[in-house]
Amino acid sequence: MPTRKAIEVVGDKPCVTAEADATVRQVAHLMKDHHTSAVLVIEQGRLVGICTERDLVMNVIAADRDPARTKVGTIMTRNPQTLAPDKPFGHALHLMFEGGFRHVPVVDAAGRPLGLLAARDALGLEALQLDAELVRREEITVIL
């Protein structure tokens, strides 16, 4: 599981992005509509930040800011840790563990976002491995 390339784990999941001048309210609606807990923030197509649910809570709600007037570029996490598409997923998990965050954007050499890895992706991969193991055991049982 941890040796799979980041781009393989991302697969065809949509990469939800917003421009830095979008309002926090717009970004919150993107999160809701796409069932995601993070939006990648871009300027001229390149990643400049990430806005997570935690950013919304800590930097908007707890700071008594108006979501309709606050630009996401002012509350996002700037320059997040990123991962190249050919790097192993295990590296992303290590970055998340060491940095204490749950998301790592996958970007190309020009800094354009290709996808977003989340800590919960590890659970999905474990489930696939478990399913394959159960099938293998069932096949062995049939043979015996």
Image (cartoon, rainbow, N blue to C red):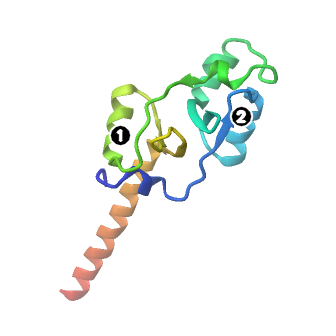
x%, y% of residue 28?
Answer: 71, 34
SS at mark 1 in the image: helix
In the rendered image, the quadrant that contains the N terminus is bottom left
Residue of label 1 = 93
Q: Is residue 141 left or right of residue 75?
A: left
Q: Residue furthest left?
A: 144
Q: Amino acid at mark 1?
A: Leu
Q: Residue furthest bottom?
A: 143
Residue drawn at the location 44% of the way across and 49% of the way down: 121
Residue of label 2 = 28
Residue drawn at the location 45% of the way across and 42% of the way down: 109
Give the answer, above or below, for where 107 lies relative to 57: below
Q: Label 1: few (<14), some or many (≥20) within 10 Å?
A: many
Residue drawn at the location 37% of the way across and 40% of the way down: 92
x%, y% of residue 122?
Answer: 39, 49
In the rendered image, the quadrant that contains the C terminus is bottom left
How far is disc 2 from disc 1 in space, using C-alphas? 26 Å
Residue drawn at the location 68% of the way across and 36% of the way down: 18
Q: Is residue 24 left or right of residue 127?
A: right
x%, y% of residue 33?
Answer: 72, 46
